[in-house]
Structure formats: structure tokens, C-alpha cells
Amino acid sequence: MRTDTMPTRFAFLLPALALLLAGCAVGPRYAAPPVEPVAIAAPEQSLFSSDAVQRDWWRQLEDLQLDALIERALAHNHDIRIAQARLAEARAVTDEAALERWPAVTFGAERTRSIAQGNGQPPEARTLAESSRAGFDAAWEIDLFGRLRRLSEAADARAQASAADLAQVRIVAVAELARQYYEMRGAEQRIAITRGTLDSLRAGLRVTQAQVRTGRGLEGDLASAEANLATTEAQLPALETARRLAAYRVAVLAGLRPAELEPLIAPRPLQPLAKRLPLGDLRTLLARRPDVLRAERSLAASTADVGAATAELYPRVDLNAFIGFVALRGADLGSSASRAFSVTPGLRWPALRLGSARARLRGAEARSEGERAAYEQAVLRAIEEVEGALASHGQNQARLQQLAQAATQSRRAAELAAVRYREGAAPYLTVLDADRTLLRAQEAVAEAETASYTSLVALYKALGGGWEAPSDAAAAQAPAASGPAS
């Protein structure tokens, strides 16, 4: 049996016509918002240079322990692994959407046997009908109005947004680990200062006890010395807790159990930031922020969704084809006489449900407007964060210098007070006041050093952590046609 439902020469013209029409698309033409240079207040020249920010910016801080922890976090952090899985999922969706634009070809074989008997006829009057069929079926939606193209564009843009999400998660994980690391180091420094103060207080207490025993000291001075020692000792548990909590957070960010972290972090004092650090060209800030790219790609995806929703208002054109063998008897299947070929075009149009299609279009347009607002907000937030981080770090550095000078003078005053007390030229109250002032000054310096490092980490996070937009991002933004145009 030979079945030709359409002349062969016309059948082969249909795919060519479909390819021609597939270039048409309805809906808005997407254009990425212009990226204009950002005007940001000039940073302090003594602190920063205009050299490009490196992707591994933390290495310039010259802390091998921090380097090792960050490298481990980049490989084992759970938030990063989750973002990687989501990116893989988004890319799979992109591949699926791209394949939807091509014919779906399946192979099948079937055999049908039916028995028919008329009403009132005897059983021997029954008729037996058989047929066999085997071959390839192809189904193709001709993308006449660009519905599938728009869906593919949307999926591709969302995959790019997921890639930007992954970059942002990496930046946040690195910055948070570095911040907690310096909080831990700051707590260690304050613990060391407190223990050093306790050693001095115990030495002073021994002097006071000796003076009381020899009758040259007062019981009130001894009580004050003991009270000051106990008060200072009481500060240690809170500092130990702060250090432990920061260390636990570092461990989690690095993908470690807390007990596994301790062998990796020997105590290390914070070093002053004595060199100029690179900031890059602040005018190109928006190209260095993955959250801004993510917002822009989400806007592109929502614009493509509007195009797909617009295409739902138009008919869908389908093309179904079969090539294979059809025979009444199974034994004849595969013979030259059983060869069959058919092409069946189809048209579907939800004429009675256009109201629903228009409602979906309005929803897509509203989502697109929301994504545009989100993009504009991301731009403003990026500028705000950099401005704030620059100001904060500059102020922290200035404050640190002033506090360091104050601590130097407080140490000198405490030493002089101790000498005068031992010589009997000053009461012990003077020593206590000087020791308290020195302890507060040293703690303030330690806190300021910690704040200086954490504000620097916040600044590099605001700058995008050395991340750069992919060079092919612009090429990936496939422009869409406006209206049914080819």
C-alpha cells in the first residue's frame, strides 16, 4: 500500500518555508539598559590605587591561613554548591527550550486487528480487518510568530542570571568568611590584650600585698587591686565566646565541622594595612557587579516572556509527517508496495479563549515592569554600597591612627603612674585609673583594627569581589523583533 497525502515536491517545500517563517517574532524588541559611567566620590589616594581589582583580592592581605580557608570554601561551601546545582538546572532548561524549536521524531510500530459483526447477523458473518504500520513520525511546530523563539530566549537569559547568581554567592561566601575570620582574629587580639593586662594587674597586686604586709600600704588599696583584677578577669569568658562563635562561622563557610577548623588556624595578630590597595576604575562599577547583571538578565527574560505571551494570541501552525510502511497483512510490511509517506499541516487558534491569553499577556507585561524596577534598584544599591563602604573604610583608618596614638600615650601614663606609686609619690587609685585607661585604649585599637579589615572586606564585596562580566554577555543577548517582522 502506498499513501501520499501531498505531492512530494510540495512536501519538501514546507520545511524551507518553515525555516523562513521561523525568523519572525512578535512582541517587544529587547534592548539592554545603557550602562553609563558611575560618578563616585574619589577615594583617599593614600589608601587606594586605580589598579584593577584581582579576582582573588584576599591574597594581597598576605595571610596564608585565610587564603587556604577561602580556597576550601570555594570548593566546599554549601551555598556555592547549591548555586552550582541551580545553574546546571537552568542550563538544562535552556537546552530543552532550544530543542523545542526542532522537529520531534519518534519511531513506532503497531498492528491492529478488529472484528466487525452487524446487528442480527450470525457469527459466521463477522468480518476480520487487519493492518500493520511501522516507521518514523515527526511533529514540528512551525514557529510562525516566534513563541518558541521567545521561550528559548527567556530560558537562556535565566541561565545567564543563574550564572550571575553563582558569582554573587561566591562573592558573598568569600566576603563573609573573611569578615568572620577577622572578627575571630580581633577577638584573639583582645584576649591577648586582656591577658597581658591581667599579668600587669597580678604583678601590681603582689606589690600592694607586700606594701600592706610591711605597713607601707593601705587595706583599701589592696581591696581595689583585687577588685580590679576580678573585674578584668570577668571579661575573658565573653571574649572567648566571641572568638569561638566567629570560628564556628568560619568553619561552616569553609565546609568544615568546627572541630576540624582549630588545627588550621594558629593564632595570628592583625597587621596594620600599610600599603595602597587596588580599587580599579570605579566608573565601570556596574560591569563588575554580578547582582546588576542578574537583574539585567531577569529583565531580558521577562521581556522575552512578553513576546511569548503575545504569540499566544496568534495561531499555531503544526506540521506532522510520517515515513515508513503500512500494510494490511503483517507479512507484507517492509515491501516496496507498503512504503508510505504523509505530511499533514495543522492550524490551532484559541479563538474562544483569547481573553485568557490577553490576561496572561498583561501579567507578563506587569512582571517585566517589575523586573525593570528591580534592575534600577540594583544599580542604585550598587552605588550606595560602594559609597558607604569607601566612607566607612576611610573613617575606620583615620580612627585607627588616632586610637593608636592615644594607646601610646596611655601606656606611657600607666608606666609613670606605676613608678610613682612604687616610690610612694601617688596613691594606688592613680595606678588603677591609668591601667583602666590603658586597657580601654588597647581594646579600642584592637576593635578599630578589626573594623578596618572588615570594612575593607565590605568594600571589595561592594566592588564585586574582582568579578568581571563574561565577554560574550552582549552576544548572548539575542535581539528580538518588534511585531511580526522577519
Image (tube, rainbow, N blue to C red):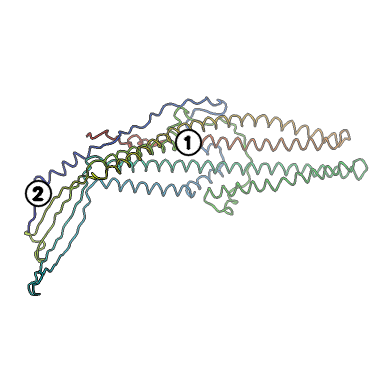
Quarter holding the C terminus is top left
**Residue at x 55%, y 30% (from the top left corner):** 390
Per the image, the residue denoted by label 1 is 464
The location of residue 184, given as percent across then percent down, is: 61, 44
**Measured Cα–Cα span from mark 1 to mark 2:** 60 Å
The location of residue 392, given as percent across then percent down, is: 58, 31
* Visible residue check, residue 233: yes
Q: Please tell me in which quadrant of the rendered image residue 350 appears.
A: top left
Per the image, the residue denoted by label 2 is 6
**Residue at x 11%, y 60% (from the top left corner):** 326
Residue farthest toward the right in the current orientation of the protein? 215
Q: Please tell me in which quadrant of the rendered image residue 46 appears.
A: top right
Sequence-wise first label, 1 or 2: 2
In front of the other: 115 or 469: 115
Q: Regarding mark 1 in the picture, which secondary structure is present there?
A: loop
Q: Is residue 430 left or right of residue 241?
A: right
Q: Amino acid at mark 2?
A: Met
